[in-house]
Amino acid sequence: MGLSWQQGPLGAKAVGTFLTPEPPPERLLFAEPLRRRMRVKLGGEWVADSEDVVLLHEPGRYPVAYFPRDDVTGLEEETRTTNHRDLGATAWFAVKDAKHAAWQHVDLPAHARVLADRVAFAWRAMDAFYEEDERIVGHAADPYHRIDIRQTSRHLVVRDGDRVVADTTRPLALYESGFAPRWYVPREDVDASALKHVEGETFCPYKGLASYYDIGDHKRAAWSYPEAWAEVVRVSDWVSFEPDVVEVRLDGRKLALEPGQTVVPHGVDRGLTPEEIKGQQR
């Protein structure tokens, strides 16, 4: 996802290659001005409000927003300190009654001084983060993450043994930064009786809440975003299938789960209800 997550350019499993005469360092951190007003709320009050946020991209992590200390209130210094492998000694703070809720790198190397006197907040320790008056969920928005959806006439067939679960010549290809393509099938081209809805949803900060289905003995073999967010509304209530769980063929070619495709499901933010997630649709 984006610049440093999954198979992005700065990710640990980057799918591309930097064309340089010497290999770059194993870990590259990238910091840049966010150039958006960002605010943080806790206990019904704003604890940070700044138009001077720096976004840090670190391999294997979601982007993290760093606020100038002058734009932050309610910090209580803790005795806890840790050491960041690239950025050195890190001091921790309580924010109101939330422990270990914010941190600051206090012994930065010279090349990382852009983060000096800046504080970052533990995302789930806060009530909510906002850009202007709109809540941002999951993590700080990654400007390098994008999703493109393309209509195609390619022939996609899904089978569970001899049973045809889906057969379509009008799937949607969803291309998402850091991932191989995912293929979505309209409900009309899916055998609904083959899908057994199962309990448990996951949350994507870019697409919304996903529901899951078993197919025969295959657990969570398919999923759907019943009310996908506006940015990806074209796949709303369409179905996608796991090619490592059931047989998925595209123009006769058997698909397989590509390296780097598996992700750990993203937890829902503190205080974020399914109704509010659905309300993100605009």
Image: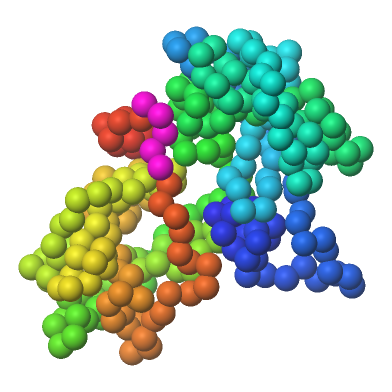
Residue 84 rendering spot, x and y as whole percentages = 74, 41
Q: Closer to the camera, 152 or 58?
A: 58
Q: Closer to the camera, 137 or 235?
A: 137
Q: Magenta span has 8? A: no
Q: Residue 195, located in which quarter of the rendered image?
A: bottom left
Position of residue 137 in the picture relative to residue 225 (left or right)? right
Q: Which part of the image, by quadrant, shows the C terminus?
A: top left
Q: Residue 55, located in which quarter of the rendered image?
A: top right
Name the residue located 48 percent from the left edge and 31 percent from the top edge. Answer: 124
Q: Is residue 65 visible?
A: yes
Q: Magenta span has 268? A: yes
Query: Quick check: 195 above or below 156?
Result: above
Position of residue 197 in the picture relative to residue 178 (left or right)? left
Q: Closer to the camera, 21 or 123?
A: 123
Name the residue located 56 percent from the left edge and 30 percent from the top edge. Answer: 122
Residue 48 rendering spot, x and y as whole percentages = 61, 17
Name the residue located 76 percent from the left edge and 56 percent from the top edge. Answer: 27
Q: Residue 154, located in which quarter of the rendered image?
A: bottom left
The range drawn in magenta is 267-271
Residue 173 rendering spot, x and y as whole percentages = 39, 67
